[in-house]
Image (spheres, rainbow, N blue to C red):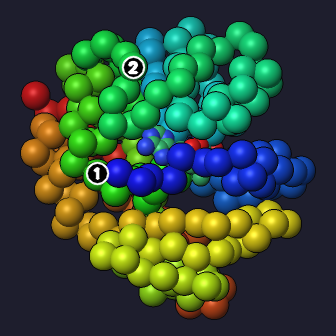
Amino acid sequence: MDDRIFDEQTAQDWIKAVERSGKSFRDDYIYPKLNSLICKYSPQSILDIGCGQGICSEKINLKNVKYTGIEPSSFLLDRAKQLYVDKNFLIGNAYALPVSNCSFDIAFSILVFHLLSDIETAVTELSRVLSKNGHFLIVTANPDSYSAWEAMYSNKKLTGKKLEGTMQLGDALSHDILYLHTFNEFKKAFQSAGLEIEQTETFLTSKDSNQNLLILIQGRKSN
Ligand SMILES: C[S@@+](CC[C@H](N)C(=O)[O-])C[C@H]1O[C@@H](n2cnc3c(N)ncnc32)[C@H](O)[C@@H]1O
């Protein structure tokens, strides 16, 4: 697997892009969705898979909730630990989460799954760590808008399902990867891992193509 664990340059570009001031679609859409989930299910424990520099831990309501962020990039993990000293961050990968079975009431992953070549293994891990009737929320590239994503890349190259190229990330041009998994592949992966999809929603409309670039997939562990 040659997934896109951020190298130092990409990590620095990502940190700048996320931390620059101003409201973004994350404030308008992603954080409110996470907060509604927390409000609805009152979890005791939450897992953030591919947490980057831990920004979600600042934006969601963690009163009486134990938060754990897992991140494979040591650059982003160091930044997370520096920014949020009271939170729990672990080095780790979506394919082998360094936590016990059935230990989280909610697990979420924001803008990570499009970087994964093997969604089956990641979803099996997600299911393993969720408690009985635990809930999940994934935000990833919308499979119905891959043509719009493709149009945003320059110097692009397609190898099998792997699309790579350069795209604008904040003020920088960054090398980026997108695995073109179909929605049916996502559905099958969730189903075989014992996870029931309860809701999907697309959002973040591209001005150029009028397509919704992102999809939210939300549901629960069904066994
Ligand atoms: C676009 S950033 C999103 C970071 C964070 N979720 C957020 O929304 O602020 C993608 C993150 O996925 C992480 N990532 C890439 N491959 C991963 C994998 N196999 N397992 C876990 N995280 C991964 C990257 O290191 C990076 O932190």
Label 1 environment density (alpha carbons within 10 Å; few <14, some 14–19, many ≥20): many
Q: Locate residue 24, reporting x and y percent.
A: 74, 58
Whether residue 48 is visible: no
- Identify the residue shown where x is 83% and y is 50%: 16
- Identify the residue shown where x is 59% and y is 14%: 88
Mark with earlier residue (1, 2): 2
Q: Which image quarter has ligand 1?
A: top right
Per the image, label 2 sits on a secondary structure element best described as loop
Query: What numbered label is drawn on residue 119?
Result: 1
Instruction: Name the residue carrying label 2.
Output: 98
Whether residue 194 is visible: yes
Q: Residue furthest right?
A: 21
Per the image, label 1 sits on a secondary structure element best described as helix
Mark 1 residue type: Ile
Q: Locate residue 12, reporting x and y percent.
A: 78, 48
Left or right of 205 in this view: 49: left
Image quarter where the C terminus lies is: top left
**CA distance for labels 1 and 2:** 17 Å
